[in-house]
Image (cartoon, rainbow, N blue to C red):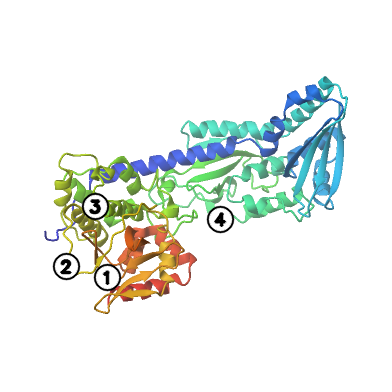
Amino acid sequence: MGEQAPMPESPALQELRNHRLDTLEQSARSSIAGQLTSPDVTENIFAHQDWDRLSSIGSYGIDSSLELPADRRVLSAIAKTQDLDASQLFGNVQSLAPDTRLVFPLGGGISLGIHKYSADKNRVSYSLNVEKDTPPNKAKEALQSFYSELLAAKSKLDGTKHALAEQIQAGSTVAYSEQTFTMREDADDILSYLGISRVEHAISQDASDSRGLAAGKAKAIEKLYGLPIHYASETQGDGEYRAKEGIHFDEQGHITEVLIGTYKPGVYVAMQPQETQAGDIDELPFRLGIKLDVKEMYIELDYNGRKHETAKPFLETAAASELLSVFDSVDLSLNSRLQDSFAEVGHIEKRYGHGYSELTREVAKLVNDRNRGYDKMFADSQSITEQISNLPNTNNPAAQIVINMLRESVTRPGDPELTELPVSHARVEIKDGGCKDAEVYIAAGDDIAYAEDGSPLLLKSTYKRPSVITLKETVFNGVRLPAGALLAVEDEGYVFMRLTAFSFDAVEASEVFGAQDAENRSTTPSYAYGAERIRHLTLQ
């Protein structure tokens, strides 16, 4: 079988691109809707108090302790019942000395205690106290009245968030509130809303700052003014709408929109001014909203949610395109699980590597087990082994290695010229020790086993589970494995786990392992040196 020119693009490639985008879009919509509608933790706990207990108070009363952050909404409701200033109360609670308790009577024999039990200025314990022999109906009425105050303190924002969630779930890409908010009057609501964006930590209440709301408001405004500036005259490139984080101005210098990214690519928290004036952000009335840029959701992220400029989805690599075309040429179709692997959605857990890692892990299962059915990778066919045996060659190295291993998993030809590694038949979790960090542990290793001819054969990983990579082509269970194959050590034999970035030169590894390889290079300074050393060993 000789080499051949790149094949025409497979129709399956565009189908998988659509599959990836649709899956990621639905995930993003569900995630942001869930954040918008999830109950406030304090509301949730107060709402699930056991009302029936108030009917059997008896002679000892009730003392129910709720350990929570110093929630502003509870304090606002307390302040209203006591005719106190809510911001001042928040600051006072934050500045309490450890092991101090405040008690606020709510009427009807009920009081709410606040206990500062540690030096952490932002953690308190709320205790709901019902005096003994309190008439149950009065206790219940007082508690329900307080809970109503608690809900009233958040009804405006809650109604907005639920309405936005409904629009996003219904398929809208832009959703805005009907009500308006100003930082001057609704800072509490705006800070809470911005908490679903990436500015959450920047504007959260500083535990060491007793100014409370004023401090959070100042941080939010500072963060907003620190966003990039965009003007209406900026071109969009392809002419299609693309969301950009930042403050957007029209030709007259009026703010038209503020967009802040979230932890989901393509999902933005939006603020839209309702007055066409070049006013201070602190004074402008805003509608709050959500904006989606569906195209942006397609991008590739690493395990920690970071984007790398050089990384792209596996589907967009030459290896993926060539493999799909090669499979088409012999009428092989991926099963649904492998479609998800190529699209990097569904069962894919980026903790264990991205698309190419998962693909070679599935091939490894076939290499390890001679009785494993090929329907674990492909749609079932009566001539599936014949189709695999007839897979043509390709010029792409990452695709060719997969093709070679698939073909030889059918025929098991071996090679007497190569070192044959012993096979373990122990049942193992193939992902254990083969996660995205496997290359980092390998790059740090220096324990080398040599072949009979004195050439480097295996390099031991520094990971706690015994594992090695091949430093030269070997035979394993009748199949030739390239250098850089990762194997677990079990019962004096080996289990093939997947290929690593060391099966390729640095350029090809960066292409096919994408964000997985980029993350290793960016987070582990010694990785690049270790990788270069290993690639040098594979050439000996």
The image position of residue 238, as x and y in percent, is: 37, 49
- Real-space Cα distance between discs 2 and 4? 63 Å
Q: CA distance from mark 3 to mark 4?
A: 41 Å
The secondary element bearing badge 2 is classed as: loop
State the separation of the CA atoms marked 1 and 3: 24 Å
Residue at 75%, 29% (x, y): give it: 147
Label 4 crowd (10 A; few <14 / some 14-19 / many >=20): few
**Residue 489 location in percent, x, y?**
37, 62
> Disc 2 or 4, which lies upstream in sequence?
4
Marks 2 and 3, the one that precedes in the sequence: 3
Q: Nearer the viewer, residue 73 or 51?
A: 51
Q: Residues within 10 Å of mark 1 (few under 14, many from 20)?
A: many
Q: Which residue is mark 4?
A: 228
Residue under pointer 3: 323
Quadrant in which the N terminus is drawn: bottom left
Residue of label 2: 416
- Name the mark nearer the viewer: 2 or 1: 2
Q: What type is the residue that disc 2 sits on?
A: Pro
The quadrant of the picture occupied by the C terminus is bottom left
Q: Are marks 2 and 1 in contact (CB under 8 Å)?
A: no
The residue carrying mark 1 is 472
Query: What's the residue type where badge 1 is placed?
Result: Lys
Spatial distance from mark 2 to mark 1, Cα to Cα? 15 Å
The answer to whether residue 76 of the structure is visible from this angle is yes
Label 3: state its secondary structure: helix
